[in-house]
Image (cartoon, rainbow, N blue to C red):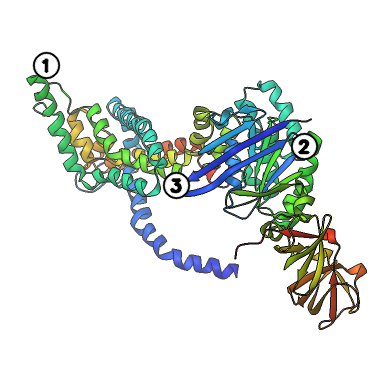
Amino acid sequence: MRGMKSLWAWVLLTPPLAVALVLFVVPLLYLFYVSLHAASPSEIHGSALTLANYTSILSDPFYLGIIRRTLGTAAAILGLCLVIGYPVAYFVALLPPRRRMFVLLLLLFPLMVSNVVRAYGWVALLGRRGVINTGLRDLGVIDVPLDLLYSTEAVVVGLMTILLPYMVITIANTLSALDRRYEEAAQALGAGPVRTFVHVTLPLSTPGIASGMLLVFLLTLSAYVTITLLGGPRSKLLVSMVYDSVVGFQWPRAAALAFILLALALALTGIILAVLRPNRIQGTGR
Amino acid sequence: MSGTDVRLDKVRKTFGPVVAVNDVTLEIERGTIFSLLGPSGCGKTTTLRLIAGFEQPSAGEVYIRGQRVTAIAPYRRDFSMVFQSYALFPHLDVAENVAFGLRMRRVPRSDRGALVKEALALVKLDALADRYPRQLSGGQQQRVALARALVIKPAVLLLDEPLGALDKMLREEMQVELRELQQRLGITAVFVTHDQEEALTLSDRVAVMRNGVIEQTGAPREIYDRPVSEFVAGFLGASNFLDGRVLSRDGGIAVVETAGGAVRVAGASAPIGAAVRLAVRPERVRMNRPGGEGLPARLRSIVYRGSVTHYYMDSAGGALLAYAQNAAAGDWSAGDEVRCAWDAGSAVLVAPERA
């Protein structure tokens, strides 16, 4: 019986595994192979194996600065999404199911507009001749337009507004699935509203916080349009460097940068999971 | 050990047009278990939640240890609660779960350890202090929930069908254990259940509820032997019901004419000529041979149940059921003519169900 079952599982799993292998694992391995070579003017990569791409990137203050800025931007977006998103999610979760569905749809609504359009919306708002600068000048508050656009702050605000719904929805789902008896049990043991939240509701919502943070963090690392349009040439992040290297036919360097980005994503995913330990609530294992 | 720990005064709770609890008044003596017994939807759990403060009464007052708590938030009331789902905090281990109430009451950390250990010893779980709830069986989780509720020494312990999720054997074991623990510690407890055997086993007093109203309150023996209504008689176990009319009265004993003949009922207050319904428990029914005393009936079927045998009979007044201990069982077979008799004190007049 058991043997038959696992045989069937393998039969069913083989096609998707094969697709993943051919379209994802093999290209990734090839990318890694490329990253271990020098650039070549005529080929995708040179012939000799070398770690030079990695060592030159990781010893170059310019690239280290970019990595730091990438992590700082991601951390700022993550923090803002969490601080703004959790209270919103908390109140959404308290709504009766029908109205909760409606509010979640409203939250999703902005995602139906293309990121390019949204980024140009921010440009129109924050630009030197944008709504804010002209408004402030007309009011006599400023004489010279403020440099709002093409800054890390603009990237943070732009990406945060795009990614906030992901945080709200994942946390709201966890909170609305939470058995209210836990909070009642805490109250029965003498915990007031604040301590009930701190000692029970918040820890029990860590699975939602963890998946929300992972979504926001990974989407931040892979965002490109918003970063390019709102960050401009002064606020480039790692992903912009990958693009610039590709455009400059520096394939091996682009591959190495892509792997550094991947390593950062994996490391921070590991840290988020290790700190929040969402599985200690969900199921087996500590 | 005397005084009233919980008092409800004409407490009413409505949810929109539905009256969940309808002017319930009750008093619970210190050191006793008081059960709220009834079918699902009778308002027993809502009554418990009104004592806890998780629901606000639409009218009436709630008192705990003489203090009016109607307008006081749950976390400021002196009670603790065991939930049907236990509601153990999954992110805390057993010891941390038990210590939770002590932490919230700002008991110093140095004192908590001993208290937790003591509470866990009480429910025989000292060895599992560092396990997480998901690593425990249902019965063990139940004990942790109990230890967590007991460790804060509440004025009243509220139990919402705490044994409902356990299998029959474990449930009966826990009933006895809970009763012993309660008596040893002198706890006041309110116990919600739909299981009449559980209520009879555990309680000092039982309130039988239906449609938001308490139909009868009394000691287990009282509500089992002297039910006031057909509903209470039927809910607490099998019962025979016969319709009749009061023929005469002799002191506290009424003679009731039924379709199969006259029977005597003790402690009945109905006037002569009144139409009445009487109830008799099957284990009170004696079976005699024709010629002996009793209502004539014919044996339809016999069900052997190990320690007892159930006899199903038809009489002029309707179906009759008798239980007999097998040690004293007579030699009966289906189709036999029988005479069914009982003591006047074993029959009781009940308010009939409006059909």
Viewer-nearest residue: B330 or B133:
B330
Identified by mark 1, the residue type is Ile
Res A120 visible: yes
Rendered view: B168 above or below B70: below
Q: Can you give x and y, in whole percent of width and height, for residue B306 in the image?
A: 84, 69
Q: Residue B16 bears which disc, if any?
A: 3
Identified by mark 3, the residue type is Gly
Viewer-closest of A107 and B66: B66
Tell me the mark number nearer the camera, choosing from 3 and 1.
3
Report crowding for label 3: few under 14, some 14 to 19, many 20 or more residues within 10 A (C-alpha): few
Q: Element under label 1? A: loop
Is residue B117 shown left or right of residue A24?
A: right
Residue A124, quarter of picture: top left
Residue placed most toward the observer, A219 or B86: B86
Callout 2: helix, strand or loop?
helix
- Which amino acid, by three-letter code, is at mark 2? Leu
Tag in front: 1 or 2: 2
**Other residues around mark 2 within 10 Å, as few (<14) / some (14–19) / many (≥20):** some
Quarter of the figure with the N terminus of chain B: top right
User: Would you say residue A259 is visible in this rendering?
Assistant: no
